[in-house]
Image: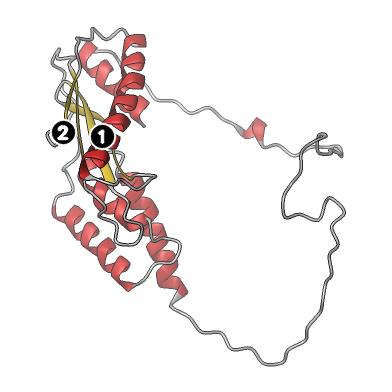
Amino acid sequence: MTTVRALVGIAIKKDWDIFQLDVNNAFLHGDLHEEVYMELPPGLVVERSDLHGDSVVFVAVYVDDVLIIGTDLQEIEALKKTGGKLNYLTNTRPDISYSVQRLIQYMQSPREPHLKVAYHVLRYLKGDPNLGIFLSNNKDYRVRAFCDSDWAACPNSRKSVSGYVELLGDGPINWKSKKQHTISLSSTEAEYRAARQVVGELVWLLRLLAELTAPLTFPVTVKQHCI
């Protein structure tokens, strides 16, 4: 989606026409009219499978009585679908990225508090449904970035959460809120990890904009007030 937003942003600034099309990919999923036999190439092993001479014992157990208990599966499935839709919506709503990032961590085994969080985000969206991103047609091609990080905010893993946003002119092009992969031993370390992440994204974004013939200006500033 970052590429799409960058393309749209450049097209607006250069007053280019924008077209959309869809390529029919039915030929990729057609049914074969003949039988095809395949085998794994030498050296490739599929773990936890019975394709390699493993000894497998099947035991049939007959039980008359079964008791199944658990939470409401319909609510769980509804919450998972809602989480997926909210995650997709972050492509145009950076203001909910942090809340959705926290929410979707628990989609494997959600609980009632997570349902309340989802409802809270939905109420927020209902209150201001038109708060999206704005891409201006002015000729400002400056690329700027802002990043930040908390420190050990996750009570379970003690990992930090980084966030960044990259702007082309005044329009946001790329943003993310994500838990860091490793534990930072200080707030400074967490902030530097956030800065490293946004710099890596900036290198890629600048190369993309250069291919789109955008008149870039250097140096590119990264606002990280905590470092």
Amino acid carrying mark 2 in the image: Ile
Q: Nearer the viewer, residue 37 or 57?
A: 57
Q: Residue at x 51, y 84 (%)?
A: 69
Query: Tag 1, which secondary structure?
Result: helix
Image coordinates for residue 116, horizontal then vertical, percent: 26, 68
Q: Residue at x 23, y 7 (%)?
A: 215
Which quadrant of the figure contains the C terminus?
top left
Which comes before the other along the chain, label 1 or label 2? 1
Is 196 left or right of 61, judged from the image as shown?
Answer: left
Q: Which mark is residue 192?
A: 1
Q: Nearer the viewer, residue 201 or 209?
A: 201
Q: Which mark is residue 21?
A: none
Q: Nearer the viewer, residue 101 or 83?
A: 101
The outermost residue toward the front is: 185
Which quadrant of the figure contains the N terminus?
top left
What count of labels does the image hold? 2
Q: Is residue 199 above or below residue 38?
A: above
Image coordinates for residue 96, horizontal then vertical, percent: 23, 48
Whole-angstrom CA distance, mark 1 to mark 2, is 8 Å
Q: Is residue 173 above or below residue 81?
A: above
Q: Is the C-beta separation of discs 1 and 2 under 8 Å?
A: yes
Image coordinates for residue 43, horizontal then vertical, percent: 79, 36
Residue on which the image places disc 2: 227
Q: Say few, some or many: other residues with alpha carbon within 10 Å of mark 2 (under 14 / 14 to 19 / 20 or more).
A: few
Amino acid carrying mark 1 in the image: Tyr
